[in-house]
Amino acid sequence: MDQCLIALEEILGDLASSPAAAGLDRSLSCRLTDLDEVVLGRLGGGAVRDLHVLPHGPAVPKADIRLTMTSDDLIALTAGHVHFGQAWATGRVKLEAGLRDLLRLRKLL
């Protein structure tokens, strides 16, 4: 899980610092299906804050931006072995968000 948190901080940090993300203030989550855990945090102010891990279940709050993938896919994305668009198109990564957020995020991903 430590590797996953480091990978998420890297990916989301790059996303948050992008000019296209200026003004975004959204909750986010990343469900790691193979670990049955969810990483929650906040994207805003050019940074990702408050990352913490919860076991997956009905008590997990629904975030504005939601990612779902395996821990191996997360590490592969960070290492550059897999491109986000390719992973999303093949179903390895799932991204859910409101329409406005999706349009904004497509520029970043």
Image (spheres, grey):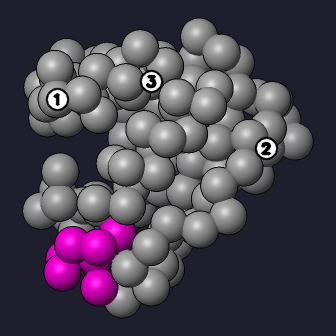
Q: Which residue is mark 2?
A: 60
What amino acid type should be assigned to the residue bearing mark 1?
Gly
Dot 2 or dot 1, earlier in sequence:
2
Dot 3 or dot 2, earlier in sequence:
2
Image: 35 above or below 28:
above
Q: Seen in the image, is 104 located left or right of residue 52?
A: left
* Segment tinted magenta in the rendering: 16-22
Q: Residue at x 67, y 64 (%)?
A: 50
Image: 68 above or below 35:
below
* C-alpha gap between disc 1 and disc 3: 16 Å
Q: Secondary structure at mark 1?
A: loop
Quarter placement of the N terminus: top right
Of badges 1 and 3, the one in the foreground is 1
Q: Secondary structure at mark 2?
A: loop
Q: Which residue is mark 1?
A: 80
Based on the picture, tell me whether residue 21 belongs to the magenta stretch.
Answer: yes
